[in-house]
Image (cartoon, grey):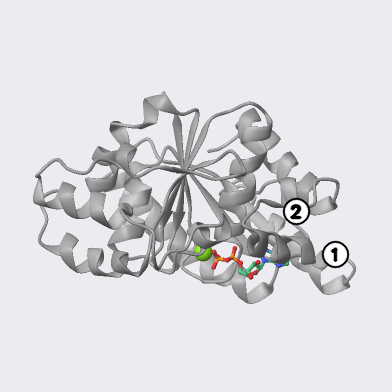
Amino acid sequence: MGKIYAIANQKGGVGKTTTAVNLGAALVERGRSVLLIDFDPQASLTLALGFNPDTIEPTIYNALAAAIDEDGQPSLSNIVVHSKSGLDVVPSNIELSQAEMDLISATSREMILREMLDAVRNSYDYVIVDCQPSLGLLTINALSAADEVIIPLQADYLAVKGVDLLLKTIFRVQRKLNHSLQIAGVLLTMADVRTIHARDVIDFTRSSLSGHIPVFETVIRTSVKLKEAPTAGESVLSYASETPAAEQYRMVAEEVERGKSC
Ligand SMILES: Nc1ncnc2c1ncn2[C@@H]1O[C@H](COP(=O)(O)OP(=O)(O)O)[C@@H](O)[C@H]1O
Ligand SMILES: [Mg+2]
């Protein structure tokens, strides 16, 4: 049965989508089958893998709306598209912003994504859900569906403070909705390791979080290649295969497969 990862942080611009794409690509490179779910109405993941959110149809919203209406159509497997990075993708677009409203009155509103994924998870080794930057119902659905959550965190003092709120939400989901949810780890991103500040932040994060939650050994450094790859509709592993950024995401995949979550 495929393992489901949610990539979550209520702060935007911390590297969630970049991590979903490049961790997914690194797992594919290791011979695994991977399904990426774009669960953000901003549709950055859809765009980053070379699809046009404005024209793509159907999307995750159609599947979600059908599941909420309980009319059984269309299922996730009818929505999957294949990217040139070898990743299967359930695309999104701005329509997904309507889903937060639709979900409010739905039965088992926190569990809809979990039920939808039950039907496809057996076809993949990994399912990775790229969350939107909020702790609303869409993110709660992702956490309820996931086996593990990865928390990308920009290597910055202020970003570390914001993690408390996310952890509270994760612990609430663990208590009420998904007892088996585990934290795979905090992944430090966008670290400019040439600066003393970034090195201090990395040390501070490790010392303040370790003991409570795991922190990935790998640190993702700032890289222009990570910014450029989405404009080519590719992962950094194919766009700039020999670069440190590609290597760092390969190491994250290795840590994920080693599995040392709590
Ligand atoms: N390590 C990195 N170095 C440089 N730019 C990065 C890095 N990781 C992400 N980015 C860029 O920062 C922006 C926000 O990243 P993104 O993954 O979309 O964040 P989120 O999904 O959390 O909003 C994007 O333009 C992305 O290309
Ligand atoms: Mg994103």
Q: Which amino acid lies under the numbered mark 1 shown in the image of this protein?
A: Val
Looking at this view, name the residue that lies furthest to the front: 55
- How dense is the environment of label 2, judged by Cα within 10 Å: few (below 14), some, or many (20 and up)? many
Residue contact at pointers 1 and 2, CB within 8 angstroms: yes
C-alpha span from label 1 to label 2: 9 Å
- Quarter of the figure with residue 114: top left
Please provide percent x and percent y for residue 205. Answer: 68, 61
Please provide percent x and percent y for residue 207. Answer: 70, 56
Please provide percent x and percent y for residue 37. Answer: 43, 48
* Vertical side of 8 occupied by 77: above or below: above
Of mark 1 and mark 2, the one earlier in the sequence is 1
**From this viewpoint, is residue 179 visible?**
yes
Quarter holding the N terminus is top left
Q: Residue at x 77, y 61 (%)?
A: 225
Q: Which amino acid lies under the numbered mark 2 shown in the image of this protein?
A: Val
| Residue 67 as seen in the image, left or right of residue 241 | left
